[in-house]
Amino acid sequence: MLPKKGNICIPYFGGVPVDLVTAIADVAKTGFYDHLNCYCMRGNTHMSQQLFNAAVAEYITFRPFFMGADERSFLAEGLKKGKKFIEFVPGEFNEVPHLMADVIGMDTIIIAVSKMDKHGYFSLGITGAYTQRVMRRARQIILEVNNCIPRTFGDSLIHISEVAAITECHRPLQEYPSRTASETDMKIGGHIIAHIADRACIQFGIGGVPNVIASMLKNHKDLGVHSELLADGIIDLIECGAVSNRYKKNNPYKSVFNVAMGTQKVYDFVDDNPGVECYGADYVNDPYIIAQNDNVVSVNAFMEIDLTGQVNAEFMNGHQYSGPGGALNFVTGAGLSQGGKSFVASSATAGKGKFSRIVPRLNSITTDPRGSVQYVVTEYGICNLKGKSTSERAKCLIALAAPEFRDQLKNEAMKFNFFI
């Protein structure tokens, strides 16, 4: 039973307990709760279908650390009525476990877990994120056992003695297929692949570019995996033998991940696989943990980058579009790694060519500060900003912009005394 008021935590994606979420929404509509704050980062479709409802929002305020399409739509719906149904909470992914567990504090965490083993342990399956840290601090833990959730190794276990209540709901996990790579993705991947050597320790985000790069790495040798996200592209690399993890300093011979999101192939691969380990973001995304591995390669996307090298990866059209996530964690970690390289990559334009992603100055959020950004990549090329002056940066970045925007960017650069 949830308290009538207080803070509840819902895990990331595959850890969302679908029947428990439905029950919470149903009870909220009766007016039983005085008021609950619901904290999450990135849920699933079922969660948004149940909780993103005006009647539920009278009693439950959703407080995400990440804004997806459903969150954005629900926020817009509330604003039309003069209400704020969604209260976004900023936080770097490596800090989210601490923020939820220690700064905010949770009364209850509800978790979808694998079936219990013979020793009384359940597994968190495909989501490390903040779940482990929060459940060690929360006042009560309620589990929903789902036989479709894989059993994973690492720091992903909870014993039945720690649990206040258990229910069951056996449903297949939501799949999250990667976007099909475009011609632009292929060009961007081609620029990056030349900079990745054998024995690199890789981290990829989700999308077409990471899949392209993964497909191009299949002839590499002795790669390592220490990644926030484990998706189909990395699974393909492991299966083809390109990944050995033998040269990693942390978790050698193990592929380490924070969250697995992909097709059923991903979930089947991690199930009871001792070569793959799931940990929380306070470990996987800690820049100093990342940096202990040599030759870390990090690839993430940007929405905008200005002529000084500041990156916006989360804000669009005056609104919070996603969240900081772990982008800066891995930019920083790769920068501290011996031989490490970080790449921020996107198409040069947005809105079907109407807008340049390379802009004179950011007018919104800075996700990655200019001093941390290393390689910037578009379909027009790649440049390393490290060690470059402001004028040199501007010149390099303008060369990565779409040709139709370059003259305008040059004129703006001169106003800032960037002599190019």
Image (cartoon, helix red, strand yellow):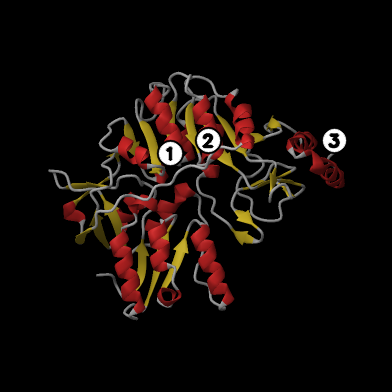
Q: Work out whether 202 lies above or below 314.
A: above
Residues at discs 3 and 2 in contact (Cβ within 8 Å): no
Q: Which of 121/378 is in front?
A: 378
Residue 197 shown left or right of residue 420 in the figure: left
Residues at discs 1 and 2 in contact (Cβ within 8 Å): yes
Q: Position of residue 222 (x, y in %)?
A: 43, 20
The kind of residue on which mark 2 rests is Pro
Find residue 153 and name its label.
none
Rendered residue at 37%/67% (across/down)? 7
Q: CA distance from mark 1 to mark 2?
A: 9 Å
At label 1, counting other C-alpha atoms closer than 10 Å, the crowd grade (few under 14, some 14-19, many 20 or more) is: many
Instruction: Residue under label 1, please give it.
Output: 231
Q: CA distance from mark 3 to mark 1?
A: 41 Å
Q: Earlier in the sequence, mark 1 or mark 2?
A: 2
Q: Work out whether 252 lies above or below 131.
A: above
Rendered residue at 67%/42% (across/down)? 370
Q: Element at badge 3?
A: loop
Query: Which is in the foreground here, disc 3 or disc 1?
Result: 1
The kind of residue on which mark 1 rests is Ala
Query: Which is in the foreground here, disc 3 or disc 2?
Result: 2
Whether residue 337 is visible here, answered yes or no, is no
